[in-house]
Amino acid sequence: MSAAASSKASLGKTSLCFASLCLAAATIAWVALSQRGPDPAYLPMMAGQAIILPDGRSIYVQKHEVTVTEWNRCADEGACEFTLRARPDQDPAKTPATGLNYMDVQHYVTWINKRSRHNFRLPTAGEWNVMAAAVLPEKPDPLFTDPSLTWASSYLVEGLAPRALKPQGSFSASPEGVVDLDGSVWEWTMECYDGLDGGTSPDRCPAFFVGGEHLAAMSFLVRDPARGGCAVGTPPAHLGMRLISDEAL
């Protein structure tokens, strides 16, 4: 074998060895990254205790609603479409993020799952009812027993919850430590309302339930419930969000 051929063969072996080392290093790095736990810099504060559902499952619920500060981290990174501003007399770190439609909150969920390396989602309507059962008032007796006056009873006895946007911690806490479920922010759920018997794909659903003083169905595009939506009963005051997880942190 000539010196030139020998040199080429040696160079080829060196290149192959280098490529193998690079591949091994990349594999080790990928395994290390995939095995890392959640990133505490992006994890929200969760309630002290899990919510136990009637079927025995546990869900882990964010203590407070997502705040303006938390939302704006998503916006600053380009994953959420717009930045929110708190009033001058409000602390953005303690003010719920509101004016959000269903598409907005899905963008946030996608972002927080990627950044936190943990799986969060919105609750179903049934899960939200269980979360809030201890702090929501019992449904009052109707003021009128005549079925034709049901609308009048609802009009007079609903709408008791405050409608002004207040900082986190201004309302009740559930026994598990979930705060402000009975406040003025109505929270999006993942449950579709299509006026049918269900079965509509979420990406084709025209409206979703929001939880507040009662469950209401809102168009997925509505950010300001005062300007539209298909709410049943008292219209929501503000639309926001709260995360839950099926896995403990």
Image (tube, grey):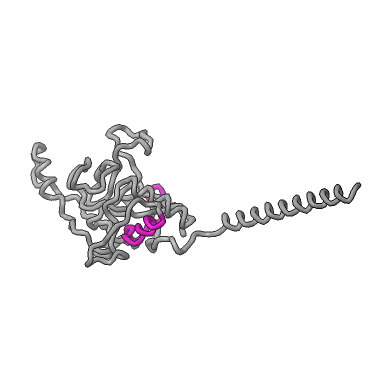
Is residue 44 rendered to the left or right of residue 220?
Answer: right
Relative image position of residue 189 (x, y in whole percent)? 33, 47
Q: Is residue 60 magenta?
A: yes
- Which region shows up in magenta? 53-77
2 displayed left or right of 52: right
The quadrant in which residue 181 appears is: bottom left
State the residue at coordinates (20%, 43%). Answer: 228
Quarter of image, res 97: bottom left
Farthest right residue in view:
1
Position of residue 65 measured from the top left corner of the image (x, y, whole percent): 32, 58
Residue 93 is a magenta residue: no
Regarding residue 233, the answer to whether it shows in the image is yes
Residue at (32% x, 60% y) in the render = 67
Q: How many marks?
A: 0
| Residue depicted at 60% across the width and 54% down the height | 30
From this view, report whether residue 112 is shown above or below residue 167.
above
Q: Is residue 57 visible?
A: no
Depth check, front residue: 222 or 137:
222
Residues 24 and 135: in front is: 24
- In the rendered image, residue 241, in percent from the top left (x then y), is placed at 32, 53
Give residue 42's position: percent from left, percent from top.
Answer: 43, 61
